[in-house]
Amino acid sequence: MTLLYADSEVAAALDASTTVDAMRAALVAAYEGRLVAPPRAAAPLGGGRLMFTAGHLVDEWYGFRSYDTFGHPEGEQLVVLHDAHTGAVRAVAVGEELGSRRTGGLGGVAVDALARPDAATVGVIGSGRQAWTQVWATAAVRPLREVVVHSRSAARRDAFAARVRAELGVPARPVADPGAAVRGRDVVVLATTSVTPVLRAADLSPGTHVNAVGFKQRDRSEFGTDLLDVAELLVTDSPAQAADYRPPMLAAEPPYTRRLRDLGGIVAGAVAGRTSADQVSVFCSTGLAGTEVFLLDALTRVPVATR
């Protein structure tokens, strides 16, 4: 029987800890070669593209995700999970919730692996779905003391702070200036649609960890090379996808590409991570292909009584 999931069912069943654990396992599997995940493919459309990502967990399952780049409100992602032995479709998810939780889960793994163990404050620039899931997952790996949020819309940042207080039980407040959101914070989340930098590296304190989720390409990025210059630890979830970005991803170009490390390797203990409390670390999220399918597989394993 094929299991079908809409956003409401995904949200009801997938908590942050389950999601982060699944993404941690996916990253290690990809690093070890058990999760085969080639860079995304695209089919041109009038004014946009139809995007495909696929993954194969060897001897267990294979599947794909498809979505478009138009950004219209009705746009939905499709994620399909097949049994590797029979080819049968085990599960299908339609909507945005699985993909955004996947991205948040990857960010949670990055915070857990790269941020200081005592990190307890978060500064957020952005107030949308991606910003929310980053904080949601971070709260699962660190006992947060405060969240400070900035976005261009006063109403949206007010609502974001209220949601953090209500759903995560963490003190949160909005601020009108992006610098005020990040100064003195242990963890910083960039999750915007801005094509120009919204963060000044000079505003970061020693030891800060940054999760960068939005645009990060040449001539289209929410941060500048000043952030990459101060980052003593520069990490991504898929070096192959980072190298495949068009336009090129800033961190995958000289002189930064030689410093770019694999998050899966760090989680597996095969690649060095943070070595001092004062290091600034930056995670450039690419959305490792196959991780949506990995998370859909984990969703099918959640006991029915908890859904």
Image: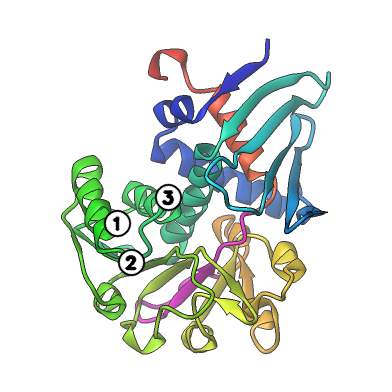
Looking at the image, residue 307 sits to the left or right of residue 287; the answer is: left
Looking at the image, residue 88 sits to the left or right of residue 220; the answer is: right
Name the residue beneath numbered marker 3: 129
Q: Please rate how many residues cluster around mark 3, counting C-alpha atoms within 10 Å: few if below 14, some from 14 to 19, many from 20.
A: some
Residue 24 appears in the figure: yes
Q: Are marks 2 and 1 in contact (CB under 8 Å)?
A: yes
Q: Which residue is drawn at 69% across and 20% down?
A: 90
Q: Distance between the residues labelled 2 and 3?
A: 13 Å
Residue 35 appears in the figure: no
Q: Do the residues labelled 3 and 1 touch (CB within 8 Å)?
A: no
Q: Give the range drawn in magenta.
A: 272-287
Q: Identify the image quadrant of the N terminus.
A: top right
**Of the residues tagged 3 and 1, which is closer to the observer?**
1
Q: Distance between the residues labelled 2 and 1?
A: 7 Å
Q: Please rate how many residues cluster around mark 2, counting C-alpha atoms within 10 Å: few if below 14, some from 14 to 19, many from 20.
A: many
**Where in the figure is residue 262, as x and y percent of width and height?**
63, 65
Question: Between disc 3 and disc 1, whose residue precedes?
Answer: 3
Q: Please rate how many residues cluster around mark 1, counting C-alpha atoms within 10 Å: few if below 14, some from 14 to 19, many from 20.
A: some
**Where in the figure is residue 143, as x and y percent of width and height?**
25, 52
Q: How far apart are marks 3 and 1 (CA)?
A: 11 Å
Q: Which residue is drawn at 49% across and 79% down?
A: 223
